[in-house]
Image (tube, coloured by chain):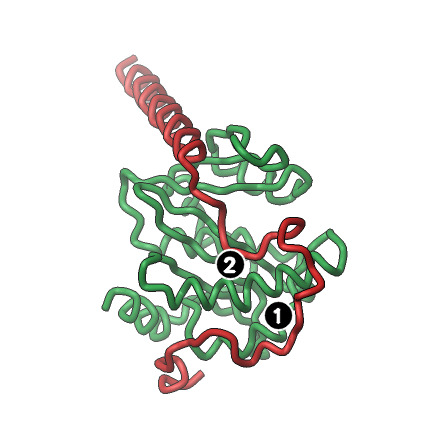
Chain colours: A green, B red
Amino acid sequence: MIFRPFLSGDKKRLSQFRCATRHDPDYQRLIGKMFRNGLVGALNDRSRNLRAFVAEDREGRLAGIVALEAFKDNWEVAAVGVSVDHRRQGIATALIKFGVANSAIRGDETVVFSVHQDNDPMHRLVASFSPERAPHPGIVSYDIYVCEPSAITRDLAAAMAKTRGSLDKDELRLGLSRDLS
Amino acid sequence: MSENEADTPASHGDDDDDDFSDLPDDKYPSRLGMEWTPAVVKVVEQAKKRLKERERENKSDDDASEEK
């Protein structure tokens, strides 16, 4: 498993990305739409400060995607997805840690998640980051979590090792230099 | 992936042959992330304050333990 930034060449791969979800097929299609249209659109929108990272398996398939977006002094983990063929391998955990570690988050900034009340795996994952939790003020089915970045990036190497992951340094440099240009 | 491919700017719309028009937007999420309404910002700021206070308390406890 290789962890690296989302690059333009990944866009075509999104059409083959089947995101794992416990919900109905319509929901899965909408998640696909969110990644295909929402992610690329947001990355192209210069008014938004968004970073996206992927995990790629040995066959070159997208195993997971995470997108983080800055808002004021916070970074929201705006989307996390793991493909149906790569579930239960710790990829979401490793990707979130990797994304937070590589998004140039300042020490005074926090990382925010909004999690649907039915998404038990995500609640358990985010709870491991020792967050503060609050009900979403507008959408009753969601909770908001606020975390310290250091609580998320802790044990990054162990999380990546669990997925047999490695870092592609050249592509990381390329992706980050583009973001910083 | 080649460097040329990676350098090509992503664009909207193309390669997307799936039709989502039958899916109601109000039932499923179609955007990345949440709407940062003033109410959401307030909730996040309050949670952030609690997080920082907890961190300070933990640090104080750690310092006190070291002094013993």
Q: Which residue appears at 36% of the width and 39% of the height?
A: A110
- Give the farthest residue toward the right: A24
- Give the farthest residue toward the left: A181
Q: Examine the rendered structure and indicate whether residue A20 appears above or below residue A118.
A: below
Q: Helix or strand or loop: what does disc 1 sit on? A: loop
Q: Examine the rendered structure and indicate whether residue A161 appears above or below residue A10.
A: above
Q: Which residue appears at 43% of the width and 38% of the height?
A: B37
x then y, percent, for residue A127: 54, 35
Residue B30 bears which disc, if any? none
Q: Which residue is mark 2?
A: A161
Q: On what subunit does the disc labeled 2 rest?
A: A
User: Which amino acid lies under the numbered mark 1 shown in the image of this protein?
Assistant: Phe
Q: Which residue appears at 38% of the width and 22% of the height?
A: B54
x then y, percent, for residue A64: 56, 63
Image quadrant containing the N terminus of chain B: bottom left
User: Which amino acid lies under the numbered mark 2 shown in the image of this protein?
Assistant: Ala
Depth check, front residue: A18 or A72: A72
Q: Which residue is mark 1?
A: A17
x then y, percent, for residue A83: 64, 64
Q: Helix or strand or loop: what does disc 2 sit on? A: helix
